[in-house]
Image (cartoon, coloured by chain):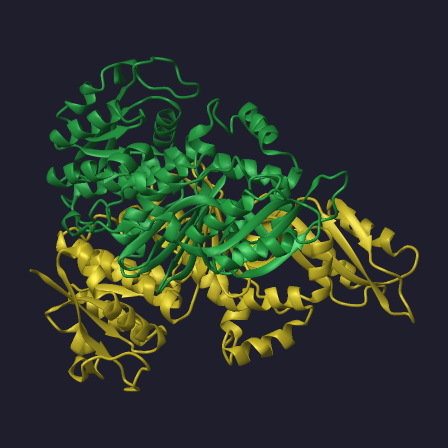
Chain colours: A green, B yellow
């Protein structure tokens, strides 16, 4: 019986999870395959013992190249993360005609074009299901299940930390920093939470999905990216009053010549399936010409969910090695030679509805001035609500919902309004997606 | 450039949808494939023109065997439905070494063992993603994405008609037959709705998923199957009072030696993701050792969603034909030779919590008698609520939630209670799943 060997570089949380799941399920996997899949080697610089995971000591090395250069190893599983060593390991694996499985979204979103080109040149497979939405099978769904369909748009809750914080803020009426501290204590947020809460991690994942959904290379640095630091309980309550929920979404749309790809807090109708995605869960909502609306939901991170996705890719790759058919499905679903280079629309040019919240002096004439400034920019107002009356000369919040407006005009109008003396704080605005 | 040809037998709603989607997306599909996929022939007995779908007249035949026997055709798409002709077409296609794509759940659930064996013997692919949950990519997820994981249980809203009726009953407080009539008028229910509302269609789909999830042949006739005719608004309201929603679920669990596979109305916590699946949408909730909880949601029926799934399978198959790798992934995810024959647990032996609703005479001693009878069978009560007081000698509803109880004992106790003269109607009971 043929044996297909894989090696794992990086024996941290996810690496340990992969080993644990593989060892536990070996018999069941054998029932599926008809050939032997074998874990041959694990490489890690830090030889810490992993709780609950037992492997023979001679399986472990501190040198990644004992895996990359091992002629018996077919699949290299890169789980070290980061963009320097990981990239070199993957490129060198391809040089040795080895297939790769990785969960490294930062690497793929920033250096994807180079990595996918190298994989293609070497006739190698690269599996990256775990890089977006953890265990959610979104990569396979886009590349394979929806291969005959035309995807129009994707809306994703793709960062568990942000969704955890927003859920807690909304349910417990506590402010952002209080919940962030709590999330850090509970392990739902990193000590340095920047990558998560500023939307960068979500943008990494969005770049990958956008590329697969529309068959185009994506320049990561052109993705507009806003995080959740500026969301307040006040805005959440106002949004709820108008039957909206605020979520951090990654949004991709195919507009024909150009595409949209952006990450920002978004007001969505509170009865939309994405609105009920709570805590650390992720969900990807896909709209297509044939499929209509699909939602895929699950854990976007964590030891075992990520391990499950990585192991799924290892098996996918092994099955194709077994039948000499690595090129059956292109790594990004489209032939590399057919990938396009669609431009990402500049955020200023995107038209949408907006939620605006101002803090203004409560006196006659203010609303007239504001609507005048909005009117100058052809911004039409759907509704305006002033919440309460001012006490002791403090400001009152004024909430405005606009009709469709180009963002450039909106920003210009808000700059002008922000400079008026009745305006007591920097105007806040969020985009609305009410037709998803 | 190589050409891979497919033919469609059955030019009804779904067949027309496949043709429409394929013709519209041909350019995009070509960008993915690197070989030519061509629709060569369409067979249908009834030559009705299909609105909005244009095909050359010489592409159409009334004889399915012009497709099955065409040496140029690689893939036969069976969309006639039913269990007689469809079965013969598929078996004959395999005899001619042709691959098959079908959406025929009734056929696969009742004759799956035979059909999958024939496919395997002929080294042929059979794609059936559209047979369960329409466009929801659940078949691929189980066979491929979760191939390294161990699925523990599946809970599915797998019949859009039932879910539409239950949603409307719950939201509009109208009774079952009124909503059914309305659903029939709107095309959400068939003129003869039996297959749907009695749970048979859901059981067909459950049989297929159970087989894939646990790698076992499933004897369809052993699946316990109850529909939604007995669900009343009264029960929905009582369930809601206790924070439950009633959904028709297909449930499969792996208990090691035996499996559970059953379809019945089920009380689930109202904040569970399945509880918020509204109207004609379907959703499959999968729990696994590694993956934790996954939910896949989308349209379970309809022309274009089903067509999208069928076309996805056609492309999947064509890609594997192109690389001579049809056997890369076994048709059911497990090698046919490794499929087990696990027994389905008899419904009487299954332990769960129950919701019981009685109509009883409102007089002292009744509750004592009922609890006595339940006690004799070792059924322990979690809570009892009598709703209101009786007027004019009418009965009052009495609702009981039990702790874990074997169904046999519950049925025996309810038989006895039903025979008491204070009991004014046949006792109603539903099963509760509160740990999903």
Query: Based on the displayed image, in which of its 4 quarters is residue B413 positioned?
Result: bottom right
B185 and A376: which is toward the camera: A376
Query: Based on the displayed image, in which of its 4 quarters is residue B403 positioned?
Result: top right
A72 and A26: which is toward the camera: A72
B18 and B157: which is toward the camera: B18
From where the camera sits, is residue A359 visible?
yes
B323 and B251: which is toward the camera: B323
Residue at 12%, 30% in the rendered image:
A95
- Residue B53's place in the image compared with A189, above or below, is below
Q: Quadrant of the C terminus of chain B?
A: top right
Q: How far from the left and from the top, in percent, is residue B58?
A: 15, 83
Residue at 64%, 76% in the rendered image:
B178
Residue at 31%, 26% in the rendered image:
A82
Q: Judge from the rendering whether residue B433 lies leftward or rightward of residue B289; answer left or right.
A: right
From where the camera sits, is residue A30 visible?
no
Q: How far from the left and from the top, in percent, is residue A66?
A: 19, 19
Q: How far from the left and from the top, in percent, is residue B64?
A: 22, 78
Q: How far from the left and from the top, in percent, is residue A20?
A: 38, 27
Q: Judge from the rendering whether residue B398 lies leftward or rightward of residue A236; answer left or right.
A: right
Q: In which quarter of the image is the N terminus of chain B?
A: bottom left
| Residue at the limit of the structure toward the left, as seen here | B1
Residue at 25%, 48% in the rendered image:
B329
């Amino acid at each position: 019986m043929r044996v297909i060997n894989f090696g794992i570089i990086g024996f941290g949380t996810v690496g340990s999870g992969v080993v644990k799941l593989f060892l536990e399920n070996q018999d069941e996997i054998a029932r599926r395959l008809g050939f032997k899949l074998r874990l041959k080697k694990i490489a890690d610089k830090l030889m810490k013992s992993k709780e609950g995971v037992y492997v023979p000591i001679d399986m472990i090395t501190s040198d990644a190249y004992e895996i990359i250069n091992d002629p018996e190893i077919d699949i290299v599983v890169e789980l070290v993360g980061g963009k320097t060593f990981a990239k070199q390991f993957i490129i060198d694996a391809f040089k040795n005609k080895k297939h790769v499985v990785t969960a490294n979204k930062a690497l793929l979103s920033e250096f994807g074009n180079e990595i996918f080109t190298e994989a293609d040149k070497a006739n190698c497979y690269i599996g990256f299901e775990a890089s977006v939405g953890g265990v959610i099978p979104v990569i396979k769904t886009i590349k394979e299940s929806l291969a005959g369909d035309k995807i129009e748009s994707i809306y994703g809750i793709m960062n568990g930390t942000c969704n955890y914080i927003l859920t807690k803020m909304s349910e417990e009426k506590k402010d952002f920093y209080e919940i962030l501290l709590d999330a850090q204590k509970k392990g739902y947020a990193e000590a340095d939470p920047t990558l998560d809460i500023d939307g960068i991690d979500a943008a990494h994942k969005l770049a990958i999905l956008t590329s697969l959904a529309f068959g185009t290379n994506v320049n990561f640095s052109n993705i507009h990216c806003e995080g959740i630091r500026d969301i307040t309980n006040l805005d959440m309550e106002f949004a709820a009053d108008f039957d909206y929920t605020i979520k951090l979404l990654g949004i991709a749309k195919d507009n024909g010549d150009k595409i949209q790809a952006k990450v920002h807090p978004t007001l969505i109708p509170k009865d939309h399936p994405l609105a009920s995605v709570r805590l650390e869960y992720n969900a990807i909502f896909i709209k297509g010409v044939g499929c209509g609306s699909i939602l895929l939901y699950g854990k976007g991170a964590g030891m075992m969910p990520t391990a499950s996705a990585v192991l799924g890719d290892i098996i996918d790759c092994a099955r194709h090695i077994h039948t000499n058919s690595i090129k059956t499905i292109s790594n990004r679903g489209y032939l590399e030679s057919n990938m396009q280079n669609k431009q990402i629309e500049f955020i200023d040019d995107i038209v949408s509805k907006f939620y605006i919240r101002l803090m203004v002096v409560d006196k006659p004439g203010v609303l007239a001035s504001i609507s005048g400034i909005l009117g100058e920019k052809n911004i039409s107002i759907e509704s305006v609500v002033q919440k309460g009356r001012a006490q002791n000369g403090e400001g009152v919040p004024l909430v405005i919902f606009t009709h469709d407006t180009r963002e450039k005009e909106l920003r210009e109008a808000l700059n002008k309004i922000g400079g008026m003396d009745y305006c007591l704080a920097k105007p806040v605005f969020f985009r609305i997606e009410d037709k998803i």
